[in-house]
Image (cartoon, grey):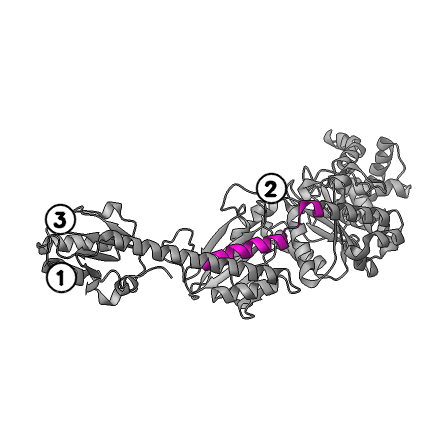
Amino acid sequence: MPPTLASLVRHPGLKLSVLAGEDRLETPVRWAHVSELADPVPYMEGGELLLITAMQIEADDPEEMSRYVRRLVGAGVVGLGFALGVKYAEVPPALAAAAKEEGLPLIGVPRPTPFIAISKAVSAAIAADQYRAVTAGFEAQRELTRAAIGAEGPTALLARLAAHLDGWAALYDASGSVVAAAPDWAARRAARLTADVERLRSRPGPASIVVGGGCAAGAAGAEPAEDTAVADRVELQSLGTGRRTRGVLAVGTGAPLGTAKRYAVHSAVALLTLTTERSRALQDAEQRLGGAVLRMLLAGEPDHARAVAGRLYGGLLDAPFRMLVAEVPSGGGAAQQPHAAPSAAPSAADEAPTEAATTTTASTSAGTAAGEAEACDPLATLIDIMEAAAARTGESVLVVPDGGRLIVLAPDGGAAVMACAEHARTVEGRRGTKARPRDRTAAAPSGDELVIGLSAPAGPIAAAAAYRQAEQALSVARRRGRMLVEHEQVAAGSVLPLLADDAVRAFADGMLRALHEHDATGRGDLVASLRAWLSRHGQWDAAAADLGVHRHTLRYRMRRVEEILGRSLDDPDVRMELWLALKATASGTSA
């Protein structure tokens, strides 16, 4: 520990005496400083033992000494050393009284002891303390390294770290979920820091924050804790080599960290970063392998795909899986052409995986909200969530960036698929864009929102069919204004929201234009009559009653419709096209 006033008083070579403040001698001393100024406060940083001979102050003046000592205490001076036998043989009563009144330790320095001897003693004690801290830090680093490369990995590392800190430690994954904690009870404490972890994850890395009742008021970087009833001091450190946070380390202690404990935390951050941040080369290699496996599956070669997948993805192909296709549509609800399935031959995109799927565009604002972070790179966020969920349960997931979209194979009913569904519900709830399947007025996703299509459960032999199902579900998700649609939901609801397309609207407008032009001249309401007749399945009396006209009038109008359009209403295909055109152009149908 650093030197204290008590350790200096006990130093046999200094022969110091205590004249006041005996109850505050355990205060640490940051430095020993000599000053004869009448007001040395502007040159103090706090924590100093101030050494004086009283050459420039009126040590006999009670009022002057009261002001002098009060200023020293206010500046954080921890002790006052007074040279005996220089100007004053003994400490002036006024100075001694002021020191006792303010609770400032007053140390008598005998004439044979030079001030420089005290400064050297303080410096040597500080150096020895720093050496002990560095030595302890290196020893902690060795222990943490051995734990990190052992069979238990991060779990053992957290246990060693908690022991070194005499506190607790917890690890959060890229999605903000607690994956390990030590001791076991710390998992409950760590779970209460979710909001603080989200706040840290929204910041560009590397970053750290301090929360909890144990941090000193006004301390740099300290922020109010979410749980004010808890008195421990918690530091949150982001993990990752880039600006994108790959995880978070939390450590809880009863007091601010000392030098040795700080070294241990920094070592843990470095080691956990190595275990959570895979090298770029390895990441690229896994992506190329995953792309090759996917192309083989879609080409109808499941045996070859299983052989190439090996232990990395092999288990994924031994049970039913779901195929997921996700993208960020450009132009919101604009019609988009379906993507072709990844080619069986390697492409440039396969050789150089899309950067957008592996890196996150970090916000330059430290206060960016989690929702804004998701909007910056929703594909990367989805990858983090699904991979983190899979890692917690030991699942294998195959993630393949494909241009501006993402293709994922994940076990049916597994944690990754459930995490994706939960993420979709959370985002839709936050944005207020969730639309029911039968809601025709659902707005299509805007340009910065994610849409996901999920296939039905399939096996390797049916991978191509699963891809088509995911594509179909993705198209329906765009039309219905939903973030996630499963293939089982494609047939649910009405087909009408799928008509919200510029090409369909243009076709419908062209088909009905002549009838609208006829009605605009006031020569009869042919469009309304056609709609009533079709809605009544061609029943003349019922349709005429709906319109409030005679059935012969309605028959005349339908003959005029046939004459103007040049098409027969006896043709079921014509009736179907006209009905869909009427629905597509109806008010409120457009998405």
Residue 145 visible, this angle? yes
Q: Which residue is mark 1?
A: 97
Instruction: Work out whether mark 3 precedes mark 1 in sequence or the reverse, and give the earlier one.
Output: 3
Q: Position of residue 198 (x, y in %)?
A: 54, 54
At label 1, the amino acid type is Ala
Q: Which residues are magenta?
A: 258-283
**Quadrant location of the N terminus in the rendered image:** bottom left
Q: Is residue 264 magenta?
A: yes
For the view shown, which residue lies furthest in the left direction? 60
In-image side of 58 versus 406 (left or right): left
Q: Could you tell me which residue is drawn at 67 percent across and 41 percent down?
A: 356
At label 3, the amino acid type is Met
What's the mark number on residue 55? 3
What's the mark number on residue 342? none
Q: Which residue is mark 2?
A: 361
> Of discs 3 and 1, which sits in the foreground?
3
Q: Position of residue 520 (x, y in %)?
A: 72, 30
> Of discs 2 and 1, which sits in the foreground?
1
Distance Cα–Cα, label 3 vs label 1: 19 Å
User: Is the residue 104 above or below the residue 502 in the image?
Assistant: below
For the view shown, which residue lies furthest in the bottom direction? 185
> Of discs 3 and 2, which sits in the foreground?
3
**Residue at disc 1, secondary structure:** helix
